[in-house]
Amino acid sequence: MDNRKLKILAAVVDEYIMTGEPVGSKTIMNHVKASSATIRNEMAELEKQGYLEQPHTSAGRVPTYEGYRLYVDSLMEKDPISEEEKKKIDELFPETAEYASADEMFENASYALAELTKCATVVASSAPKFSLISKVEVIPTGKRMYVILMITSNGSIKNKVCRLQFDLTHEQLAFFESFARENLEGIAVDELSDEFFEKLSEAMGTYMMSLSPIVSALMNMSQEMTSHSVRVDGQKNLLTCKDFDQNEIITFLDNQNDEIKRFINESFSGLKVQFSPEDEGFVIHNSSIITAPVEKDGVSFGTLGLIGPMRIDYAKFIPYLEYFADRMTRMLSQGEDDDEQAT
C-alpha cells in the first residue's frame, strides 16, 4: 500500500474515532494534500482491500476491523500525556499511597483508569510462582463461625468464612496455629496442590476430624490464589455507550469472569489490542480490549486493561494504560525493595 493510502486510512480512523460519523473525502482533504476526486478513488481502493466500508451508498466510509488493526499496529501516533493529565492521575491514583495489599492497589488503579477514560476497566491479579505463604490464621467470629485468613509474601490476602458443627477448643486452635506455622508458612503458592493437602491432612492425625472443614477452606483459597482473580469496573460506561447492544452488555456482565479470562491468559507478553471479530465467542460485538501486563521484579504479576468500542481513542488511551501499568509495576517492586531494606 502506498504512503498516500496509509495517510488517508489513518485520517479516516482518526476522524471516525472523534465523531462516530462516516467520513467523506472533503473531510480528508484537511489531512491529505490531494483533490477530492483523488481521495474518493483512494478510499474506494481501500474499501476493495477491506480496510474501509460504506454503511450507505451516499455516505462516507468507516474503518473495518482490518482497518483498525492496521491503524493500531502501524499508523497510530500516540498522544503524549501532558503534565496536567499526569497531575490528574496522581490525584486519582497517587504513587505515594500506602495500600494494604496488592489487591487494593489493583482495585484503586481500576477505578482511577475507568474514571479517566470513561471506559470499563478490567484487572486480573494472581499470586506469582515465587510468592510464599507468609501467614495462615483461624479467627473465631461467633458461635461455630470462623474466618480463615491467608496472606502471601506478595501482599495478596484471602479470607473465607467457615461454619463448623461445633466450637473449636483452645487446644485445637493452638494446635492448628502451631501446625500451620510449621507446615504452611514459607511454602510456595504453586506447591499447594490437592496432593499437598492430602499429606497435610494425614499429618494432623486425630486432629483431622475436627479441623477438616478448615483444611477444605484452605484448599479452596489456594485454588483461588493460583488462578486469575478478575475484576471489572466502570460497567456503567459500557451500559451508556451508544456503540453497544445493551443486551450484549448485560450478558457480558453476567458472565464477565469467563468472558475476560481467555483474553487475560495471553496478555503477559506485552501490551495487546484485541478486537471482538478476532474472537467470535466474545459476546460484545464491535468492541476492543486493550491489556497491559503488570510486573513485580521483572516477573508477571497481573493485567490491567480497558474495554470499549472499536472506535476507542487508541492514541490517547494506550499511553494512559501504559502509564498506569508502569506505575503499578514500579510501586509493587518498590514495596519489595522497602521490605528488604527494613530487614
Image (spheres, rainbow, N blue to C red):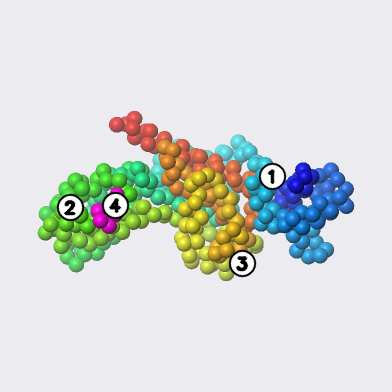
Q: Which mark is residue 176?
A: 2
What residue is at 51 percent from the left and 40 percent from the top? 326
What residue is at 45 percent from the left and 47 percent from the top? 302
**Which portion, as a residue range, is magenta?**
191-196
Q: Which mark is residue 175?
A: none
Relative to the observer, which residue lies in front, 294 or 199? 199
Three-letter code for the amino acid on which mark 2 is drawn: Phe
Magenta segment's dominant SS is helix
Residue 92 % position (x, y): 52, 44
Mark 3 or mark 4, which has the lower sequence index? Answer: 4
**Disc 2 versus disc 1: distance between alpha carbons?**
60 Å
Query: Which label sits in the foreground, 4 or 2?
Result: 4
Name the residue tied to disc 4. Answer: 192
The answer to whether residue 15 of the structure is visible from this angle is no
Mark 3, residues whose alpha carbon is within 10 Å: few (<14), some, or many (≥20)?
Answer: some
Three-letter code for the amino acid on which mark 3 is drawn: Asp
Mark 4 or mark 1, which has the lower sequence index? Answer: 1
Mark 4 or mark 2, which has the lower sequence index? Answer: 2
**Disc 3 versus disc 2: distance between alpha carbons?**
53 Å
Mark 3 or mark 2, which has the lower sequence index? Answer: 2
What residue is at 17 percent from the left and 52 percent from the top? 176
Name the residue tied to disc 1. Answer: 75
